[in-house]
Image (spheres, grey):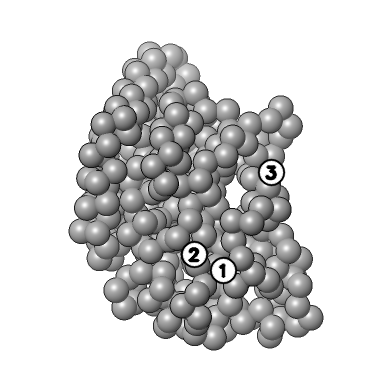
Amino acid sequence: MSQDSRFVIVTPMKNEGPFILEWVAHNLALGVDEIAIYSNDCTDGSDALLDRLDAMGKVRHFDNSSPKPGPQRRAYRRFMKSDLAGDDDWIIPIDADEFINVKTGDNTLRALTDAVPQARTLSMTWRLFGNAGVQGYKDDFLTDQFRMAAPEMQRRPPQAWGLKTMFHRRLWGHIGVHRPKRPTVESFADTHWVNGSGQPMPERYWEGSWRSGPDSVGYDLVQLNHYALKSCESYLVKKARGRAHHGGDSLGLEYWQKMNHNRVEDRTIDAIRPRKAAIYEELLSDPELRRLHEACCDTHRNMIATLRSAPEFGKLMDSLLATGTEATG
């Protein structure tokens, strides 16, 4: 793997204010070179916080608001038309509730690609992390609060083995939600596609598929920690926002039970915690950024209080508390 290849994250984002700084610090600790964030229709102060991070040179922030539907696909199209990534750079499309967990070398993305120098396309399989019995919102690291997950070999629900895929720009013409599309090469072999254990991906991925299977799942080198739920209280805010990239999808007790897996403790992501914490504190040493972060947290708390007093959300909260850390699937 050429040391000249850069790591460039692209993500759409809406109303993730309280969680942005941890996510940015985590990615910087992984050795990411560029973080391109396309925010849309934010009402919680996220856009102001992202603007400050942009001014500090930590991210590139773009307003992606539009009356047209499809903010995620719009963000990906805009990114691919930009010059933010070169032909041999790694493009990494992930969301704000997804944390890359590298398990090799010094736990950086460079260590990951050095471990599989032949790779030019690399899929990371989700590990679903449940709410771990956490009821109330706290301004603490998500990776500290939520350590309970689905087992590696749990195949259901389908999301348990969902994947996200990083790739060299020159090989693909389009970013799909879970994997790149429109190959610019002639054969599957030319994609040099491996899984999270560094093993070759089956050729069926040339045509499609958004999740791992028994013949393609692999967690040895990297996994993608997916914190889709967080605390019971924060889940109310997520429901009020709606699924940022899935218009019309309802978030309620059914989705919670589908995604709330707390059967195995997994602390492997702690390997980069010291680096991440140092970067996080450095970010907060900027007074304006700290003020904006605290404002986002206060807005989140106020929204929780408002939602809990509304009949529909109050009923959902009672149901969430009643389920504890149980999980289906």
- Residue in front for this viewpoint, 66 or 54: 54
Q: Which residue is labeled 2 in the image?
A: 7
Indicate the position of residue 177 as horizontal and vertical percent values: 63, 54
- Residue in front for this viewpoint, 272 or 231: 272
Q: Is residue 315 above or below residue 259?
A: above
Q: Which residue is labeled 1 in the image?
A: 89
Q: Which residue is labeled 3 in the image?
A: 74
Q: Residues within 10 Å of mark 3 (few under 14, many from 20)?
A: some
Amino acid carrying mark 3 in the image: Arg
Q: Who comes first in sequence, dot 3 or dot 2?
A: 2
Q: Residues within 10 Å of mark 1 (few under 14, many from 20)?
A: many
In 3D space, how far apart are the residues under numbered discs 2 and 1 (Cα atoms)?
A: 6 Å
Indicate the position of residue 99 as horizontal and vertical percent values: 40, 56
Q: Secondary structure at mark 3?
A: helix
Instruction: Select label 3 or label 2 by which is in front.
Output: 2
Q: Who comes first in sequence, dot 2 or dot 1?
A: 2
In 3D space, how far apart are the residues under numbered discs 1 and 3 (Cα atoms)?
A: 21 Å
Indicate the position of residue 192 as horizontal and vertical percent values: 62, 82
**Residues at discs 2 and 1 in contact (Cβ within 8 Å):** yes
Q: State how many labels appear.
A: 3
Query: Going 27% across and 55% down the picture, which residue do you hit?
Result: 276
In 3D space, how far apart are the residues under numbered discs 3 and 2 (Cα atoms)?
A: 21 Å
Q: Is residue 265 visible?
A: yes
**Residues at discs 3 and 2 in contact (Cβ within 8 Å):** no
Q: Is residue 122 above or below residue 60?
A: below
Query: Going 45% across and 41% down the picture, which residue do you hit?
Result: 54
Instruction: Select label 1 or label 3 by which is in front.
Output: 1
Indicate the position of residue 316 as horizontal and vertical percent values: 43, 27
Amino acid carrying mark 1 in the image: Asp
Amino acid carrying mark 2 in the image: Phe
